[in-house]
Amino acid sequence: MKFSTKEDVEVPIDAAFAMMCDFEGFERAAMRRGAEVQRTDTKTVPGVGMGWRAAFNLRGKRRQVDLEMISFDKPEEMVIECRSQGLLCLMTLELAALSKNRTRIMLTFDIKPLNLSARLLVQSLKLAKTTLTKKFKLRVAEFAKDLETRYKPGQV
């Protein structure tokens, strides 16, 4: 099952990619929402091999997710693989420069079940795909607006 969307932002591609690489900020945001996040690597610069282990409550059950950066091509693309109980999710973030100060952000989530219970979960998600897609697109649009708000000309 796949979710995808794109947003155009008034931010140069290098600055947009740098803001997308604020992994410490994303970790803090997840912790503010009640998740436990732990780095599983020792890398000091963003790149392939970065990893996280996250635990959070979802629908009354404690969930654990292992995330790993499997592709990192600055400033165009990063791919993060997420593994959870029976699910494999690939999150692909692609950036394309539309002009000197304008960037297109394309975000794709591809969810694949690995066992029967995960297949049932994905099947139930398919029934709510329209609603989930609207929420996904709204969240990405809010994130894009936040990028524009945080961008200060001259930063990279």
Image (spheres, grey):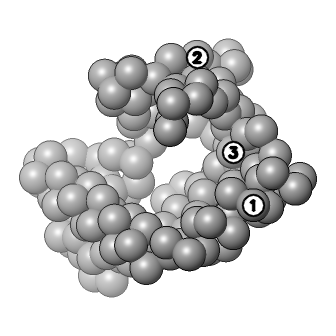
Q: Residues within 10 Å of mark 2 (few under 14, many from 20)?
A: few
Residue 133, how many percent across, how many down?
42, 73
Along the viewing direction, whichever of 68 and 61 lies nearer the viewer: 61
Q: Quadrant of the N terminus?
A: bottom right
User: Which residue does the numbered mark 3 point to in the structure image?
Assistant: 82
Residue under the point 39% across and 21% down: 34
Looking at the image, residue 12 lies above or below residue 146: below
- The numbered dot on residue 38 is 2
Residue furthest toward the right? 115
User: Which residue does the numbered mark 1 point to in the structure image?
Assistant: 120
Which amino acid type is shown beneath numbered disc 3? Answer: Cys
First in sequence: mark 1 vs mark 2: 2
Residue 48 visible, this orientation: no
Q: Secondary structure at mark 1?
A: helix
Which amino acid type is shown beneath numbered disc 2? Answer: Gln
Q: Residues within 10 Å of mark 3 (few under 14, many from 20)?
A: some
Q: Secondary structure at mark 3?
A: strand
